[in-house]
């Protein structure tokens, strides 16, 4: 008997470990998909090499910002509670240290209780609940007793609760830090939240098991949509504690949180981490373990009772399914108005069938944005009529951006396992995605239009400023619809079997970061800054769409990737690299000489240009890139002719522009200052006539225009590249530089050699310098 018991115990512990290890391995593989690397793989037969995407760079950047944001919110919440609950001790920005006061402990117990509920609701709100397949249905087929199976299920859900880790770990780390653990705080905080994660796993298992046993899958999808809304609202309520201006009623909750709440598991976890001595810490930890142990014992008993008749529960779940009767009626197609294309009508029909997707797409964005506004106190002590036009515009664009993130970003995922069917229809996948992007742009535009109409009604007038903000938002929504669909090509995996792996969070956060950058067009003070943001956003959408189009033929291929080609995104990256290297070099000169001479500017410009040119040439050579712009070749005489002609045309237009400015007495101070700098510095002509044409033409004509020409006809590509070229120059010279961009792009398009735009650029700059010197 003793030997048999020992063997049974060993088998039980081994079973728990195997299932927990399986869950961890599964989670690690899911995470590794974002990096396209295999985790924990063993050596064996060589497999087909996967695609190389270098996603780890984007993931690392976004992950850093996420950790920074969560840590900042957790720190600010402790400061706010300390200032509100310890007014005699807490200064405005002081962080408490050592043992907390009784009021501070109650406040943190309230916050941790809310975080605990968020960890439960957030785990229940995932699409796993709405899936028709239930993993417990195949887990019960394993040769394990039911109590042992339930224990292993709790262990794996405790360790693999990502939402619980994201909500509780930053809070636990910060409490451990201020309690004196310092650099061991992350480890101590992780240990301190384990009982709460175990308890959250228990409640989650009890709830989802009961729901699975009693509700039909259609009702589960509806309930999952409701839970997603509740979890978002509660999450923003907790985040509001960590804002610079926390909500008054939340602080009142913290002040009046009952003392007995500190003896519940969340409060005991705070007490354990903040105990001043080992004896108190051991007592609080023991009490926490006892409470969680009793709760787990009762919960396992309830789970066993729920599953007393098996997983199907004597057909209760099946009866819930069979209760939904399908009635087939004979329908006759009637002619009438049909909205959109066949693809768009199909997308709308799928949206209407999936209520969970419907709520997440059309309802959740409104709740998210207005929750942020309310919880951040932006409507505090103000009426609707007193809201600024910029705030109205930011609300409108925010709702539209969230709608696109929930819908357009999921365009490929909506196809699911039927994605391969798109390759069989006599149409390109790009055209199908384009129609879907147009549909989601139209649906997302409904929110800004409604908000601006309401603003006009409330304010009782529509001023020019509001109309301008409306134009910015209405231009931005189609742009970001294209960006969302393009990023969804890289950030979604419709063929993934796991719900969590269908979307790569890195690209979701990347999309939100890009959408946040567009709001600068709303709050920028100068008109030209707004134009710069809009033009760059449009160029970014074209660049990402071009990359996505190259990827589409290889979606179903696990190994092959599109061949390397010069793209618009290469030009954007090259321009950014050029300006960054130039800025760093100028900063070094400034630190060394404490002033910037013309020679230093030319040297910095040349270093930045040569570095960018050399690195891109090296990368293109190593990757065997197609479509690299060439400087010389057959047809040099033709390139010379086009370069001279384009340069003279651009110089003539620039001369007319300078003459007009002089006649209208505009920008005379700027022109006189430029003439003085030109006469006092001989390095400026060298920079303008030699260095600038060589390096700028490689970036703006060779890469940006060359990439645009792959996707656009000649005229739109010429105009778009000229606009980008103009906006990186000072506002006073945007108009003539735009003309130069048109002439240079036309010369490059006709000759396919950079020699032509370089000559045109040099002639234009020489003519402008000569005219400014005379004026």
Image (cartoon, helix red, strand yellow):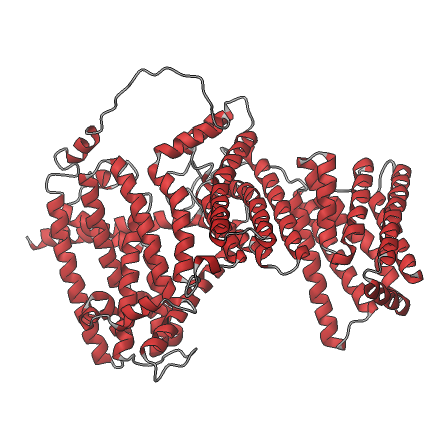
Rendered location of residue 236, percent (x, y):
37, 58
- The residue drawn where x is 29% and y is 44% is 224
Q: Which picture quadrant has residue 526? A: bottom right
Rendered location of residue 239, percent (x, y):
38, 62
Closer to the camera in the image, 556 or 387: 387
Closer to the camera in the image, 404 or 252: 252
Closer to the camera in the image, 132 or 773: 773
Q: Quadrant of the C terminus?
A: bottom right
- The residue drawn where x is 88% and y is 60% is 685
- Most distant residue in the right direction: 774
- The residue drawn where x is 55% and y is 24% is 427
- Most distant residue in the bottom direction: 88
Count the labels in the image: 0
Q: Is residue 29 left or right of residue 106?
A: right
> Residue 194, relative to residue 560: is it above or below?
below
Q: In this view, does 98 lie to the left or right of 607?
A: left
In the rendered image, is residue 88 in sight?
A: yes
Rendered location of residue 774, percent (x, y):
94, 61
- Most distant residue in the front direction: 460
Q: Is residue 134 left or right of residue 573?
A: left
In the rendered image, is residue 21 in sight?
A: no
Rendered location of residue 339, percent (x, y):
48, 27
């Amino acid at each position: 008997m003793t030997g048999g018991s020992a063997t049974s115990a060993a088998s039980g512990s081994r079973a728990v470990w195997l299932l927990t290890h399986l869950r961890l391995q599964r989670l690690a593989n899911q995470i590794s998909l974002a990096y396209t690397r295999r985790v924990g793989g063993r050596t064996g037969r060589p497999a087909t090499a996967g695609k190389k995407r270098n996603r780890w760079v984007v993931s690392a950047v976004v992950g850093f910002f996420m950790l920074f944001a969560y840590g900042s919110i957790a720190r600010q919440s402790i400061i706010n509670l300390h200032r509100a609950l310890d007014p005699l001790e807490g200064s405005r920005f002081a962080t408490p240290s050592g043992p907390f006061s009784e009021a501070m402990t109650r406040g943190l117990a309230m916050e941790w209780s809310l975080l605990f509920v968020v960890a439960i609701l957030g785990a229940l709100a995932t699409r796993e609940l709405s899936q028709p397949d239930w993993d417990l249905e195949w887990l019960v087929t394993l040769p394990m007793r039911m109590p042992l199976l339930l224990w292993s299920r709790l262990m794996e859900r405790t360790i693999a609760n990502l939402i619980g880790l994201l909500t509780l770990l930053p809070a636990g780390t910060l409490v451990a830090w201020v309690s004196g653990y310092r650099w061991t705080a992350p480890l101590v905080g992780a240990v301190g939240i384990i009982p709460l994660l175990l308890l959250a796993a228990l409640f989650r298992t009890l709830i989802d098991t009961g729901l699975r046993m009693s509700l039909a899958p259609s009702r589960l999808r509806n309930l999952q949509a409701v839970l997603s809304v509740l979890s978002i609202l509660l999450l923003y309520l907790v985040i509001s504690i960590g804002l610079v201006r926390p909500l008054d009623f939340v602080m009142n909750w913290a002040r009046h949180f009952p003392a007995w709440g500190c003896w519940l598991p969340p409060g005991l976890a705070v007490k354990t981490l903040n105990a001043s001595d080992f004896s108190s810490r051991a007592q609080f930890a023991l009490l926490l373990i006892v409470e969680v142990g009793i709760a787990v014992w009762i919960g396992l008993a309830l789970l066993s009772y729920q599953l007393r008749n098996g997983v199907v529960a004597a057909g209760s779940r099946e009866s819930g399914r069979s209760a939904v009767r399908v009635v087939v009626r004979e329908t006759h197609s009637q002619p009438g108005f049909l909205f959109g294309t066949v693809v768009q009508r199909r997308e709308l029909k799928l949206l209407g069938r999936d209520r969970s997707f419907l709520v997440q797409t059309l309802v959740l964005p409104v709740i998210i944005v207005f929750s942020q506004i309310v919880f951040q106190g932006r409507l505090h002590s103000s009426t609707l009529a007193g809201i600024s036009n910029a705030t109205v515009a930011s609300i409108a664009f925010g709702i539209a951006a969230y709608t696109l993130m929930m819908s357009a970003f999921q365009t490929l995922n909506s196809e699911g396992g039927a994605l391969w069917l798109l390759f069989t229809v006599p149409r390109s996948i790009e055209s199908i995605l384009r129609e879907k992007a147009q549909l989601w742009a139209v649906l997302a535009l409904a929110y800004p239009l409604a908000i601006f109409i309401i603003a006009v009604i409330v304010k009782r007038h529509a001023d020019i400023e509001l109309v301008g903000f409306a134009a910015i938002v209405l231009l931005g929504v189609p742009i970001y619809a294209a960006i969302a669909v393009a990023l969804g090509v890289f950030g979604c995996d419709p063929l993934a079997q796991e719900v969590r792996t269908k979307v790569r969070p890195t690209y979701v956060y990347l999309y939100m970061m890009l959408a946040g950058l567009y709001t600068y067009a709303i709050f920028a003070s100068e008109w030209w800054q707004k134009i710069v943001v809009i033009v760059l956003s449009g160029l970014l959408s074209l660049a990402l769409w071009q990359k996505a189009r190259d990827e589409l033929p290889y979606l179903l291929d696990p190994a092959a990737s599109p061949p390397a080609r010069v793209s618009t995104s290469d030009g954007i990256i090259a321009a950014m690299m050029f300006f960054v290297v130039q800025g760093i070099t100028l900063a070094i000169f400034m630190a060394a000489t404490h002033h910037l001479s013309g020679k230093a500017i030319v040297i910095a410009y040349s270093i930045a240009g040569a570095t960018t040119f050399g690195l891109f040439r090296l990368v293109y050579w190593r990757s065997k890139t197609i479509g690299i712009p060439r400087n010389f070749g057959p047809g040099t005489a033709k390139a010379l002719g086009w370069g001279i002609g384009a340069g003279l045309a651009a110089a003539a237009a620039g001369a007319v522009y300078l003459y007009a400015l002089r006649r209208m007495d505009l920008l005379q101070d700027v022109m006189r200052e430029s003439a003085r700098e030109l006469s006092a510095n001989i390095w400026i002509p060298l920079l303008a006539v030699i260095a600038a044409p060589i390096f700028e033409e490689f970036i703006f004509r060779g890469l940006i225009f060359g990439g645009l020409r792959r996707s656009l006809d000649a005229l739109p590509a010429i105009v778009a590249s000229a606009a980008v070229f103009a906006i990186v120059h000072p506002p006073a010279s945007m108009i003539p530089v735009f003309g130069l961009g048109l002439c240079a792009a036309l010369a490059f398009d006709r000759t396919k050699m950079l020699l032509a735009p370089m000559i045109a650029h040099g002639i234009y700059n020489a003519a402008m310098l000569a005219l400014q010197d005379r004026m």
